[in-house]
Image (spheres, rainbow, N blue to C red):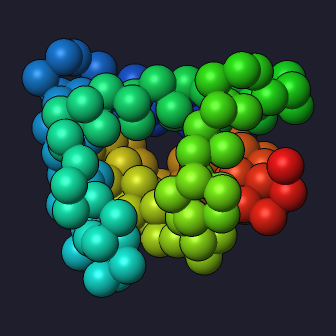
Amino acid sequence: MKNYLGFFLDSLYRATGGETQQHDFLTRFYELFLESSPDVALHFRDVDMERQKQMLGRSLQEMTDFSTSRAANEHLRRTAFRHSRWDRDISPELYDLWLESLIATAREFDLEFNEEVELAWRVVLAPGIAYMQFKHDHR
């Protein structure tokens, strides 16, 4: 029997399997995310989106690693600081929009997406999101 991590990784692979497909997935994610709130769009107005897509790909790996290890590596700690009130001040509420946009994108790209797969995305990403939200106000 597969666990949530297995469902998540299989879905992520189906959604982002090839280089072109990964680029399309990340492009669609940012379309949805930027449309989700004027606050989100404001944070990305002067951002190199191609670089941002590369960083998201790595961030998904970091969030997956954090979900299994429950230990923040240097990259995740730096990312959390960059998103904290002391740097870019990314509001903790925006992570809900981030997750919903990511799930909506996975639903479009993963032909086997269902409720169990959606729950897997939520369960696997929840610890990393909680970490990022907490670090907004705590060093």
Q: Nearer the viewer, residue 84 or 37?
A: 84
Q: Which residue lies most toward the front here?
A: 86
Residue that extends furthest to the bottom in the rendered view of this protein: 38
Percent of width and height locating residue 67: 77, 34
Please tell me in which quadrant of the rendered image residue 43 appears: bottom left
For the N terminus, the quadrant is top right
Give above or below for 130 relative to 35.
above
Nearest the camera: 114 or 35? 35
Q: Is residue 1 left or right of residue 93?
A: right
Residue at (20% x, 55% y) in the render: 46
Which residue does the image show at 17% across and 34% down from the upper left? 50
Up/down of 100 relative to 135, above or below: below
Foreground residue, 26 or 77?
Answer: 77
Please tell me which residue is depicted at 29% across the width and 72% down the height of the picture. 42
Q: How many marks?
A: 0
Is 88 above or below relative to 26?
Answer: below
Instruction: Please determine whether, in this image, residue 2 is positioned above or below residue 122.
Output: above
Q: Which of the pair 76/33 is nearer the observer?
A: 76
Q: Is residue 28 visible?
A: yes
Percent position of residue 21, x then y: 17, 28
Q: Position of residue 94 (x, y in %)?
A: 52, 71
Q: Residue at x 19, y 17 (%)?
A: 19
Q: Residue furthest top?
A: 19
Can residue 25 be seen at all in this image of the molecule? no
Residue 32 horizontal side relative to residue 88, left or right: left
